[in-house]
Amino acid sequence: MTDYSDEEQRILSYLRESAARGEQYFRAKNIAEAIGLSSKQVGARLPHIAEKSDEVDIEKWGRARSTTWKVTLS
């Protein structure tokens, strides 16, 4: 079992629930607002979660003003 920090667990839980409802594209700012973290905290942790998680696939999708992340359930 992979060990996640409290922040990583909160992010992962939010992504799992949102992806299960059909959402696929996320910005760190929107995740942060939903779970009470800063966008920097979320943005710094998403690549680490992507490497560790078998539950969701997280892919850096696009970068306009901020990075968009594509999330799908594994």
Image (spheres, grey):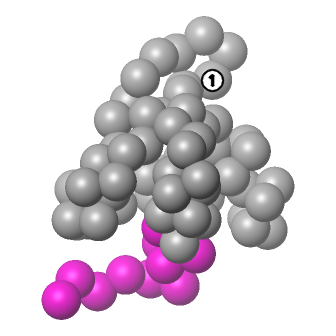
Q: In the rendered view of the protein, which quadrant contains the N terminus?
A: bottom left
Say whether residue 65 is left or right of residue 59: right
Is residue 40 visible to us here? no
Mark 1 nearby-residue class (10 Å; few <14, some 14–19, many ≥20): few
Rendered view: 17 above or below 68: below
Determine the image quadrant of residue 66: top right
What residue span does the magenta drawing correspond to? 1-12
Is residue 45 visible to us here? yes
At x 53%, y 85%, the residue is 6
What secondary structure is marked by label 1?
Answer: loop
Q: In the rendered view of the protein, which quadrant contains the C terminus?
A: bottom left
Residue 7 falls inside the magenta stretch? yes
- The percent coordinates of residue 14 (x first, y second) are 60, 65
Rendered view: 33 above or below 29: below
Say whether residue 2 is left or right of residue 66: left
Name the foreground residue: 32 vs 25. Answer: 25
Name the foreground residue: 68 vs 16. Answer: 16
Name the foreground residue: 72 vs 47. Answer: 72
Say whether residue 63 is left or right of residue 49: right
Determine the image quadrant of residue 52: bottom left
Return the residue found at the far top: 64
Which amino acid, mark 1? Answer: Ser
- The percent coordinates of residue 45 (x first, y second) are 45, 58
Residue 35 falls inside the magenta stretch? no
Say whether residue 51 is left or right of residue 71: left
At x 33%, y 35%, the residue is 59
Name the foreground residue: 20 vs 71. Answer: 20
At x 59%, y 53%, the residue is 21
Determine the image quadrant of residue 70: top left
- The percent coordinates of residue 17 (x first, y second) are 57, 64
- The percent coordinates of residue 40 (x first, y second) are 63, 49
Q: Name the residue under label 1.
A: 66
